[in-house]
Image (tube, helix red, strand yellow):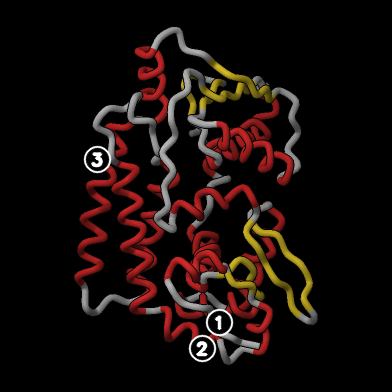
Amino acid sequence: MTAREIRYRMTRAEFDVVSVFGGLLATEVPGPVFVAVLAHRGYSASSVRNQLSRMVVRGVLVSRRCGRHTNYRRAAQINHQYERLSGTLDVPEYTGSFPALIVTIPESDRSHRDRVVYLARLCGYRPVRAGVLIALDTPAADRLRVALAEARVDHDGVDACTLVPASDEQARAWVRRAFEPAAAGAAVDALAARVAAMVADPDLDQARYFDVFHALSAQTSRTRPLPRSLAPGYDADTRLADLASRVVDVWLERFAPAMFDEVAGLPEAASIEWDQARWAAVGTAPPDLR
């Protein structure tokens, strides 16, 4: 990734903001609730409000007025990665071709080019050579169309197409080059050791918990589910999904009850919109804060 592309990555502060949705099992959260939850990680009220505003400008969050306060939702461009952090995993099947993106934006408009490449990576694309990115399934192409539209990105020099490799061996070579399965496996090994140490720590606090969760988020962004026909023996994706489930369980067991008790005392909490699918998955109903 280029230096300019790196500046579009989600920062640690942005990660902490987005993690509030997962911590609450919510799809829409009021600004004052972000302030209360993030105070436990050392953020001041003004820094949280400023961060929320910047994330709306960047297109990471979507906001709406709700009475005297503002509510926030995740933008479509980050939803796919967020869902993967829940521990869910859909392994794509190879159908003989790859959705692809040909980027011919000139060096004179490098910031625009880097923004397009960043959004493509968020949606599951990876570079197979300079200016050519491939994805593994049609949903990645659908996500990218939505992300480009939501971010109001100019489509000049951006061409979506389908690439058909000459053979299965060439397809496997493209996957090795673009998605680096061997490197992903080694990275997940190291992360698994961190998660195991965290789970075994009786004195675990929120600061350390979210350090590990941030590392998990970053690795999830880099590690794609791969068709087994193109990556024999690959299991980094399934192991990463298992780690995500373990980390989420730690939150629900050790930290969530106290957080919900605190949030229940905020008048703005009545406008939280719960993620009903997530609550159903954990086998309980969301708290009634109205």
* C-alpha distance separating marks 1 and 2: 8 Å
CB under 8 Å between discs 2 and 3: no
According to the image, label 2 marks what residue?
Answer: 262
Q: What crowding class fits label 2: few (fewer than 14 Cα within 10 Å), some (14-19), or many (20 or more)?
A: few
Q: How many marks?
A: 3
Residue 101: percent from the left, percent from the top? Answer: 60, 24
Residue at x-position 55% and y-position 60%: 14
The amino acid type of the residue labelled 3 equals: Ala
- For this orientation, the residue located farthest to the bottom is 265
Residue at x-position 66% and y-position 75%: 30
Depth order, front residue of 135/282: 282
- As drawn, the label of residue 27 is none
- As drawn, the label of residue 36 is 1
The amino acid type of the residue labelled 1 equals: Ala
Instruction: Pick the quarter of the image with the C terminus.
Output: bottom right
According to the image, label 3 marks what residue?
Answer: 186
Secondary structure state at the residue bearing disc 3: helix
CB under 8 Å between discs 1 and 2: yes
Q: Earlier in the sequence, mark 1 or mark 3?
A: 1
